[in-house]
Image (tube, rainbow, N blue to C red):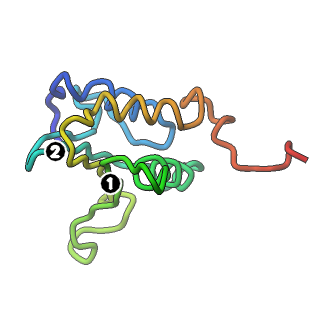
Amino acid sequence: MSDEPHHPKFEKLVDFLARIPAVDVNDTPSQGIGSGEGNGGWWVKFSIDVDHDLAWETVQELGHVLNYMSVEERLPTVFKPVSPPPYMNGGPDEFLSWVIEADDPTFTPALCAEWLEGRLPRPVTDLDQWSMDDEDAG
C-alpha cells in the first residue's frame, strides 16, 4: 500500500479504521491503509492482524455493518477479503487484506465512517467494549 497521504475525502474513514484495535497500521502518512476511486465508486484496503485477540470480532462487526446491517435498507458497500495467490506468496498474516468498496458516490467515505462509528463498539479503542462474552449478562 502507498506511503502517500490519503486524499482528504478518505481521512475520516482511514482515521477511524486506524483506531480499531485489530487493524494493522504503521507510521507512514497512509498509516498502511490504501484508498482510491474508480468505476463510479471508491475503496479502502487494509490489513487486520490475524494474531490479535479481536481479529474475528473485527471482521464480524465490519461485515455486519457494511454488508448486511438491514435486509430492507442495505448500505451500498461491500466488505470482503482480498489476497494474491497464497501458493505464490504466503499466509494470511502477511498477504490477506480486507477491502471496503462502495459503488454509490453519494455514500462517501466520511459517511461510511459515521455509520461505522455509530454502530461499532464505543469507544472503538476500548478493548472491553469489544467483548462478546455474556458472563456479565447473567
Compared with residue 105, is residue 27 higher up or lower down, i.e. above or below?
above
**Residue in the picture at 36% in, 47% down:** 75
Q: Which mark is residue 78?
A: 1
What residue sits 29% from the left and 60% below the top?
95
15 vs 102: above or below: above
The residue sitting at 41% across, 28% down in the picture is 114
Give whichever of discs 1 and 2 has the lower sequence position.
2
Q: Secondary structure at mark 1?
A: strand
In the picture provided, is 96 more to the left or to the right than 126? left
Of residues 48 and 16, which is closer to you in this image?
A: 16
From mark 1 to mark 2, how far is it between C-alphas? 11 Å
| Quarter of the picture holding the N terminus | top left
Q: Position of residue 84 (x, y in %)?
A: 21, 66
Query: Farthest residue in the front direction?
Result: 72
Where residue 91 sits in the image (x, y, percent)? 35, 67
User: Given the current orientation, which residue lies at the most extreme top position?
Assistant: 8
- At label 1, counting other C-alpha atoms closer than 10 Å, the crowd grade (few under 14, some 14-19, many 20 or more) is some
**Mark 2 Cα-neighbour bin, 10 Å: few <14, some 14–19, many ≥20:** some
The residue sitting at the left extreme is 39
Q: Percent position (x, y) of residue 97?
A: 31, 55
Q: Amino acid at mark 2?
A: Gly
Q: Nearer the viewer, residue 80 or 108?
A: 108
Residue at coordinates 35% horizontally, 54% vertically from top-left? 79
Q: Which mark is residue 9?
A: none
**Furthest-bottom residue in this view:** 87
State left or right for residue 79 relative to residue 58.
left
Picture quarter containing residue 125?
top right
| Relative side of 106 to 126, left or right | left
In the picture of the structure, the residue carrying the numbered disc 2 is 41
For numbered disc 2, what is the local secondary structure?
strand
Query: Which amino acid lies under the numbered mark 1 shown in the image of this protein?
Result: Val
Q: Looking at the picture, how far across and down is residue 124, in whole percent?
A: 54, 31
